Amino acid sequence: MQKMIVALLLAAAAFAVFSLVSGASYLGVMLPGGLPLGNLLAAVPLCAIAGAAVRLSPAATAARHASLLSLAASAAWLPVSIALAGNLALNFSGSRGSVWLAFSIAVAVVAFCVLGWAFVAALLAKQKRAGAA
């Protein structure tokens, strides 16, 4: 079940990235409240990758704590982005755009690094269990 959840999370991230890169027509659909669907889909890969890291990392390890922090940062990405832009369309002006870009890159890099760490930690934990048996 664990592997299926991780696979579904990574598939959701891939779908969102593909949608964004391809410029799918549905990205401009306005959700209730005026948030464009594309802006919500931009948060999906960050949250899905961080969520996969949480599911992969062994409980009560540094990798689990880091992945939980990564998930929190990923979940905060859209609200922070909206706050920095001052609008739901994420149109930036002045230096706020540079701050947003740096924040976005940092969250993405952390999410991918923590996913790699969680993957290695899961493999090591599996090896340790196999060696103990």
Image: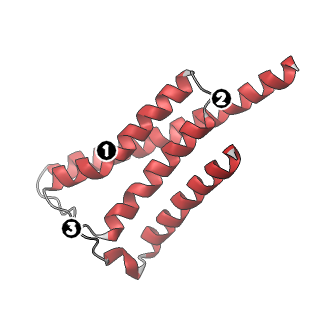
Residue drawn at x 53%, y 22% as measured from the top left: 62
Q: Picture coordinates of residue 54 (x, y %)?
A: 54, 37
The amino acid on which the numbered mark 1 sits, given as a three-letter code, is Ala
Q: Quadrant of residue 117?
A: top right
- Mark pair 3, 1: CA separation: 18 Å
The single residue placed furthest to the right in the displayed view is 133
Q: Which residue is mark 1?
A: 76
Q: Give the answer, above or below, for where 90 lies relative to 70.
A: below
Could you say which is closer to the camera, residue 4 or residue 48?
4
Residue drawn at x 32%, y 48% as measured from the top left: 77
The amino acid on which the numbered mark 3 sits, given as a three-letter code, is Gly
Q: Which residue is mark 2?
A: 121
The amino acid on which the numbered mark 2 sits, given as a three-letter code, is Ala
Q: Give the answer, above or below, for where 99 lies relative to 94.
A: above
Q: Picture coordinates of residue 5 (x, y %)?
A: 62, 50
Q: Between disc 2 and disc 3, whose residue precedes?
A: 3
Q: Quadrant of residue 33?
A: bottom left
- Rendered image: mark on residue 33: 3
